Image (tube, grey):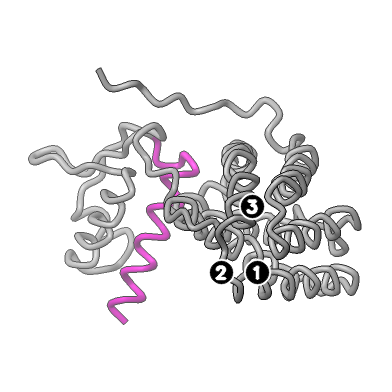
């Protein structure tokens, strides 16, 4: 029960902060949150600790719990990504993630063709063909599961642990696009084939072909979603001097 209340408090406050309902600079008091959320002080303390770790709030003695601006948030945390995808900033979040993936995934595909262990190469090919079948059949939940698995294997197969640690962010992106109706029931045939092309190029160790096919996937993804971020402002992080 305590865990459930803790999760509920984090979701409530995190969603409201990221959506702007609790704007930057807003100050909350623990005792007020206890009453509002109908939870104990210990639940509030734990929730605030989590939100602090995400850069969403800071606590100040004799002041309270202050909401921080987006420039202070941890943009790589899957919870923050999920909350942003559920907010009016969805387009901006999709743009940032698409640009990150466009920079990383083709490089990861190239590295995977050079470095991935044989079992991973075989699994990637199997997943790519299963994705194509699920896409043809309109099996949306199955396709999402396989899509996440495919891109996770791609990042892992690069042998670069920093790339591999983006698996959670990519999973939240793909899940968010599906949940919010931004994925077709039947993915485009070319995109399905490009996933197969990536997998087969990695399987045979063709790094240039793997990178090229992955780049085509990301360019199409960005083209498909660009309307969602028209006029959405960018977040500029101050440079530390």
Tag on residue 121? 1
Look at the picture and state if 48 lies above or below 99: below
Quadrant into which the N terminus falls: bottom left
Viewer-closest of 174 and 211: 211
Residue drawn at x 28%, y 77% is 2
Q: Position of residue 11 (x, y in %)?
A: 42, 60
What is the tally of numbered marks visible in this picture?
Answer: 3
Query: SS for tag 1?
Result: helix
Query: Is disc 1 surrounded by few (<14), some (14 to 19) or many (20+) residues within 10 Å?
Result: many
Specify whether 145 is left or right of 133: left
Query: Is disc 2 surrounded by few (<14), some (14 to 19) or many (20+) residues within 10 Å?
Result: some
Residue drawn at x 56%, y 69% is 117
Quadrant of the image occupied by residue 43: bottom left
- Label 1 – label 3 distance at C-alpha: 11 Å
Q: Position of residue 67 (x, y in %)?
A: 31, 39
Tag on residue 109? 3
Query: SS for tag 3?
Result: helix
Viewer-closest of 233 and 97: 97
Specify whether 135 is left or right of 115: right
Residue drawn at x 23%, y 61% is 44
Instruction: Identify the residue under disc 2.
Output: 117
């Amino acid at each position: 029960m305590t865990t459930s209340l803790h999760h509920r408090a984090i979701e409530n406050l995190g969603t409201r902060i990221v959506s702007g309902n609790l704007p930057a600079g807003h100050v909350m008091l623990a005792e007020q949150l206890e009453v509002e959320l109908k939870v104990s002080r210990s639940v509030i303390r734990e929730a605030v600790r989590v939100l602090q770790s995400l850069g969403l709030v800071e606590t100040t003695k004799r002041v309270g719990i202050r909401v921080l601006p987006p420039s202070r948030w941890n943009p790589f945390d899957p919870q923050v990504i999920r909350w942003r995808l559920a907010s009016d900033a969805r387009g901006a979040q999709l743009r940032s993630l698409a640009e990150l993936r466009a920079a990383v995934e083709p490089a990861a595909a190239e590295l995977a063709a050079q470095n991935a262990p044989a079992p991973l190469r075989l699994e990637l090919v199997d997943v790519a063909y299963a994705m194509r079948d699920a896409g043809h059949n309109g099996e949306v939940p199955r396709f999402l599961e396989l899509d996440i698995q495919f891109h996770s294997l791609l990042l892992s197969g690069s042998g670069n642990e920093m790339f591999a640690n983006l698996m959670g962010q990519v999973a939240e992106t793909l899940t968010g696009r599906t949940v919010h109706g931004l994925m077709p029931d039947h993915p485009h045939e070319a995109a399905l084939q490009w996933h197969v092309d990536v997998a087969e190029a990695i399987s045979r160790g063709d790094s240039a072909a793997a990178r090229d096919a992955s780049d085509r996937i990301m360019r199409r993804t960005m083209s498909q979603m660009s309307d969602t971020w028209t006029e959405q402002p960018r977040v500029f992080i101050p440079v530390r001097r």
